[in-house]
Image (spheres, grey):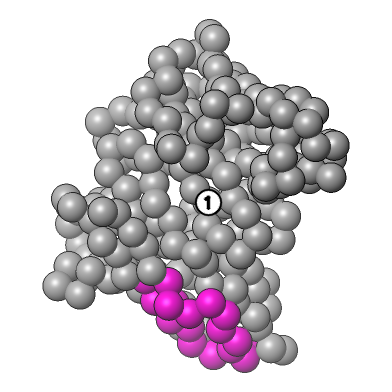
Amino acid sequence: DTGVSQDPRHKITKRGQNVTFRCDPISEHNRLYWYRQTLGQGPEFLTYFQNEAQLEKSRLLSDRFSAERPKGSFSTLEIQRTEQGDSAMYLCASSSGGPRSYNEQFFGPGTRLTVL
Amino acid sequence: AQSVTQPDIHITVSEGASLELRCNYSYGATPYLFWYVQSPGQGLQLLLKYFSGDTLVQGIKGFEAEFKRSQSSFNLRKPSVHWSDAAEYFCAVGGANNLFFGTGTRLTVIP
């Protein structure tokens, strides 16, 4: 069990460019979550998947954001036409999703996005 | 509406002193409660969790937390702080799906 991994760890881009982040959850976990964390704040929920199905999206997830989990394993989060306000740490988490998991989530190291 | 309040933005303690970090929550149903710790530039590590049963829960690194339903609180404690405990601490509340986090308390430890 290698834990949740995220790639890249850091991304610097220019305003207007598209960026894509990848998350690999713990292998036996069927739930995967994306959060955004800005400086001095706690993580804010963006979206989550149960296997390949995207079951919930926050109002924070504007139409420039899209997330996928095509085979129920890894997930990607794409931001189109990035804005400076998108600069944040993007965190991925996974959980087993079983009845006794109680939504216990395990987090990856995050991807730090800087939009210039 | 769900929310978590961590009233202390920054706490400074001396190494070896006791610690209590406060957390109050608002949640419409029986909550699942968590404390996470985050070192600079890193992800979140789970310290402890409460689902049901005994209201005093033990976690890793010598931390414990007590759930008080009447006060809607889930305060984190440690009897003797170590320099390596310096970090940001987040309280979170959730149900079956997503988690709601507080704004965090930054802990500074003085040698």
Q: What's the residue at 72%, 55% (across, down)?
A: B41
- x and y percentages locating residue A106 in the rendered image: 51, 41
- The answer to which image quadrant residue A97 occupies is top left
What's the magenta region?
A: B6-23
Residue B37 in view of the camera: no
User: Quarter holding the N terminus of chain B?
Assistant: bottom left
Disc 1 marks which residue? Answer: A43
Q: Is residue B39 magenta?
A: no
User: Quarter holding the C terminus of chain B?
Assistant: bottom right
Q: What's the residue at 78%, 31% (across, down)?
A: A16
Q: Is residue B14 magenta?
A: yes
Comparing A87 with A102, the one in front is: A87
The correct choice, above or below, for B11 with respect to B93 in the image is below
- x and y percentages locating residue A80 in the rendered image: 69, 26
Relative side of A27 to B3, left or right: right
The correct choice, above or below, for A42 with respect to B69 in the image is above
Under circle 1, the secondary element is loop
- x and y percentages locating residue A64 in the rendered image: 61, 27
Comparing A32 with A20, the one in front is: A20
Instruction: Name the chain letter of the residue that bears numbered label 1.
Output: A
Residue B13 in view of the camera: yes
Q: What's the residue at 62%, 91% (across, down)?
A: B14
Crowdedness of circle 1 by 10 Å Cα count: few (<14), some, many (20+)? Answer: many
- x and y percentages locating residue B60 in the rendered image: 48, 61
Please name the amino acid that badge 1 sits on: Pro
Q: What's the residue at 17%, 57% (across, down)?
A: B53
Relative side of A17 to A53, left or right: right
